[in-house]
Image: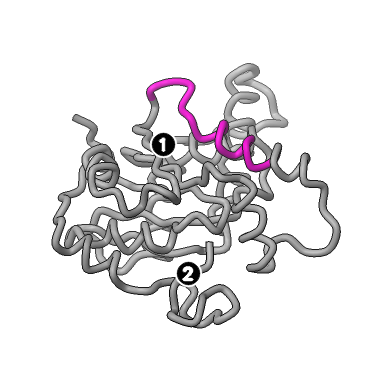
Amino acid sequence: MSDKTPFILVVSYGRTGSTLLKEILNTDPRAEIQGENGMALQGLMDVYESLVAADSQKRDDPVSPWHTHVDIPCALENMELLIEGALFRRPDAIKGFKDVGYRKMQTEDIRSFIGMLARIYDLTVIANFRRDKRALLDSLRRAGHLTGTYDRRSTLAGLEAVEAAVVPRRETYRYTRIDYADLHDLDALGEVFRVAGLEFNEFLVKQVLATPHSNHNRPELTDEHGAVVA
């Protein structure tokens, strides 16, 4: 059993039901899964990679006057304090967040970002994507995430790169995936909860599923009955 703090990262690229999934996960009273933070921790990843590079240079040449010693465990400990102090309110909660900005990151940067979190936390990555890519592109465009002229092929390639990037190449974190079309499948949701170490309460989950979510202030994305337009 890991002595690290549990942490849940929901990876999406938008229009996949990630806000709904966040609320479903929060039906476990121990959980505090927050919403988007503007990929704020991407900057922390840049700091971490610079520290690792500096430490590597010093290890390769310990007597060099040009490079500095870096205490990586201390850096990770303080990164954890920064993340939890800035983004969360409940010290004892099972923490996590969802974000959708991964479309703007390179594949290796996504892997490095997840790798950094896996060094800090006992990490579970929940991939929340969408199998129907034509419907996904239409939904992204209606929501304003795709504007002007864009190349469909390269956009799809970018989305598929995000999907590939989050699959662990080594057993450094737990991984599970749930797609937009499966968010009302209680068995699929139960498996997500199991992997993430959360308690699945079917009654509370059904209550969340019956509640309109991210589009209630965006009438162009709902029909006359308030149902989400896919």
Mark in the foreground, 1 or 2? 2
Q: How is the image coloured?
A: one colour
Mark 1 touches mark 2? (CB < 8 Å): no
Pointer 1: what residue?
Answer: 118
User: Magenta includes 77?
Assistant: no
Q: Position of residue 224 (x, y in %)?
A: 49, 82
* Residue closest to the far right: 149
Q: Quadrant of residue 125?
A: top left
* Residue closest to the far top: 60
What count of labels does the image hold? Answer: 2
Q: Quadrant of residue 226?
A: bottom left
User: Magenta includes 163?
Assistant: yes
| Amino acid at the residue labelled 2 | Val
Instruction: Determine the CA span between mark 1 and mark 2.
Output: 35 Å
Q: Is residue 103 above or below residue 24?
A: above
Report whether 32 appears left or right of 76: left
Q: At numbered mark 1, what does the secondary structure look like: helix, strand or loop?
A: helix
Q: Position of residue 167 (x, y in %)?
A: 48, 30
- Whether residue 95 is visible to the viewer of this picture, yes or no, is yes
| Amino acid at the residue labelled 1 | Ala
Report whether 84 appears left or right of 219: left
Q: Is residue 108 above or below residue 121?
A: above
Q: Position of residue 36 (x, y in %)?
A: 49, 63
Pointer 2: what residue?
Answer: 228
Comparing 103 with 123, the one in front is 103
Q: Residue at x 36, y 57 (%)?
A: 21
Which mark is first along the chain, 2 or 1? Answer: 1
Q: Residue at x 29, y 48 (%)?
A: 185
